[in-house]
Image (cartoon, rainbow, N blue to C red):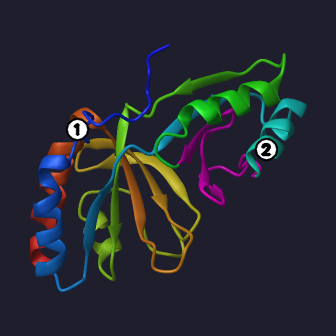
Amino acid sequence: MADTALTARQHSPLAHAADRLAAATRSSGGAVRLAELPFLAQVNVRLDGKSPAADAVGLALGLQLPLEPNTVVRAADLTAVWLGPDEWLVVGRPGAQRDLESRIRMAAGDGPVSVIDVSAQRTTILVTGPRARDLLSHGCPLDLHPRAFGPGRCAQTMLARTQVVLVARDEARAGFWVLVRSSFAAYLTDWLLDAAVEYG
């Protein structure tokens, strides 16, 4: 297994864009805030959501895997994102992927389960501010009105022709996570920065 622990040599996919993201936040007067959340632990889990193994995994993580489509469950420093009837993405603090993998595998026991560290696959862009929904709506086909996509909702969708996992955060004014493949992160960031100009 590849070593996924954080090292001093690691660079996030958007390290080069940090100054531009901060400048966009300043120029919009806080209407939109863009920032990368690099190196979040991301573990893909597949199992039968109605099985004893799923219950055991929930106990081990301190949160139940969400069974309602396109919902998110959050507890402490973990977030479980529904991706399909038998698939979830468990997101945690940077560097926690090995611990998460181990806890999930041990809890599932001999039950059929797939646990894969996908932390290096994606980075996360935080989009917040009073105009965050408007900004994302420019390039996303989903209805992002709070009645349709309110806090605690998620979706695998397209944003500016890029496949993403979009998560409406459940804390007050927490905005959205945009989880994007690392190879598309620079393109999507350029698109977001360009779309944010109108709020400057």
> Does 22 sit above or below residue 105?
below
* Residue most extreme to the top: 1
* Residue most extreme to the front: 8
Residue visible at 16% across and 44% down?
186
Q: Report which residue position mark 1 lands on.
A: 184
Task: Specify whether 131 is left or right of 64.
Answer: left
Label 1 environment density (alpha carbons within 10 Å; few <14, some 14–19, many ≥20) = some
Which dot marks residue 117? none
Q: Is residue 68 magenta?
A: yes
> Does 182 sit above or below residue 114?
below
Identify which residue, 182 or 106, lies in the foreground. 106
Label 2 environment density (alpha carbons within 10 Å; few <14, some 14–19, many ≥20) = some
Tag in front: 2 or 1: 2
Q: Is residue 29 magenta?
A: no
The C terminus appears in which quarter of the rendering?
bottom left
Residue 133 falls in image quadrant: bottom left
Q: Considering only order in the chain, which callout, 1 or 2, is on the residue closer to the N terminus?
A: 2
Residue visible at 34% across and 48% down?
38
Q: Report which residue position mark 2 lands on.
A: 58
Q: Secondary structure at mark 1?
A: helix
